[in-house]
Image (cartoon, helix red, strand yellow):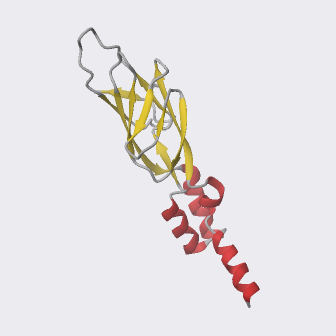
Amino acid sequence: MFRFVLIALMGLSLSACATVVRGTSEDWVAESEPSGARVETTNGYSCPSTPCAIDMPRRSTFVATFSKDGYESVEVHVSNEIAGRGAAGLAGNVLIGGVIGIGVDAVSGAALDLTPNPARVTMRELGEGEENTPAVMHYERSAPEEEAEEEPEDDVLMN
């Protein structure tokens, strides 16, 4: 009986396809021009100098602030969305993991991807005596290739 319960528990733990295949965290990449900016996030993570990668929970939503002496700080709003591979993992639960697998993947965030990832910012050099007021970067999702009329050079818009 104990053996049966142990095997059943092991099977349940493996039933969440996206959790097993993708994991519950991913490297979120921060890049800046010029490089060497410090990045701090509202959920307590940081890196001392760009470019860098931070192992971040997939369920995270946060604001990342890029700062460098002599340059205007930049804030990037990062959220998450169901990824193509994450959706495939969820769909795999229909075949293997059932409702329990779908629930585990949904709660763990394994079906999600952080967006934007990578976050690329261009920092503006401050003029003499100019105050550092953070600029906010807004990312727009790119249209699928067949729908896009022209390939944008960068998917970052700055307000």
Name the residue at 28% across, 10% down. Answer: 127
Quadrant of image for the C terminus: top left
Query: Looking at this rendering, what residue extends furthest in the top direction?
Result: 128
Splitting the image into 4 quarters, where does residue 4 fall?
Answer: bottom right
Task: Give left or right: position of 159 versus 41.
Answer: left
Name the residue at 54% across, 67% down. Answer: 104
**Image x and y of residue 54, in percent:** 53, 40
Name the residue at 49% across, 64% down. Answer: 107
**Image x and y of residue 33, in percent:** 46, 19
Look at the picture and state if 5 lies above or below 126.
below
Look at the picture and state if 98 lies above or below 61.
below
Q: Between 157 and 53, which is closer to the camera in this rendering?
A: 53
Q: Between 42 and 31, which is closer to the camera in this rendering?
A: 42
Look at the picture and state if 111 lies above or below 31.
below
Query: Looking at this rendering, what residue extends furthest in the bottom direction?
Result: 1
**Image x and y of residue 6, in percent:** 71, 80
